[in-house]
Image (tube, rainbow, N blue to C red):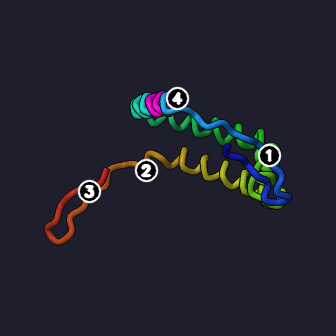
Amino acid sequence: MPKTISPIDGKVLQTYEYISDEQLKQKIDLAQQAFESWHQTSLQQRKELFLKLAQLMMEQQQELAKLNTLEMGMVFKTALGDVKKSAQGTIYFAEHAQERLKPIEFDEGGLKGGLR
């Protein structure tokens, strides 16, 4: 059985059950549906969702930092900074997604093309 083990003291924090092949197939199908739905989600909606995620991360920073400490052995202060940095990165990418995701056209020595 898979386990989450504390790197600090070797204590088992969580034990997990294996899933069946059928459960795995269901999860893969669900992931495909989520991908297709996300693909249809507008950039504005994605931005709003990512900003909400960052807000939730900041609201739950103590709990998330504690989880980092338990599962990865991080010092709590460092883990707290890691959560804040992750939330700030999420905000940055939400606010700059349109610029970062725009197609790029190029013409290099007669070789023309684009990246999307």
In the displayed structure, 22 sits above or below 81; it is above
Residue type, numbered disc 1: Leu
Residue 23 at least partly seen: yes
Q: CA distance from mark 3 to mark 4?
A: 43 Å
Q: Residue at x 50, y 49 (%)?
A: 96
Q: CA distance from mark 2 to mark 1?
A: 42 Å
Tell which circle, 2 or 3, labels the residue nearer the N-terminal end: 2
C-beta proximity under 8 Å, tags 1 and 3: no
| Residue at the spot of label 3 | 105
Residue 34 at least partly seen: no
| Residue at the spot of label 2 | 99
Packing grade of label 4 (10 A; few <14, some 14-19, many >=20) is: few
Residue type, numbered disc 2: Glu
Q: Residue at x 72, y 52 (%)?
A: 84
Q: CA distance from mark 1 to mark 3?
A: 50 Å
Viewport quadrant of the N terminus: top right
Which quarter of the figure has residue 52?
top right
Q: Residue at x 77, y 47 (%)?
A: 67
Secondary structure found at label 1: strand
| Residue at the spot of label 4 | 23
Q: Residue at x 73, y 41 (%)?
A: 15
| Residue at the spot of label 1 | 13
In the displayed structure, 7 sits above or below 102; it is below
Magenta stretch: residue 6 in it?
no
Secondary structure found at label 3: strand
Horizontal arrangement in the rendering, residue 103 relative to residue 59 (left or right): left
Give the percent coordinates (x, y) of residue 36.
40, 31
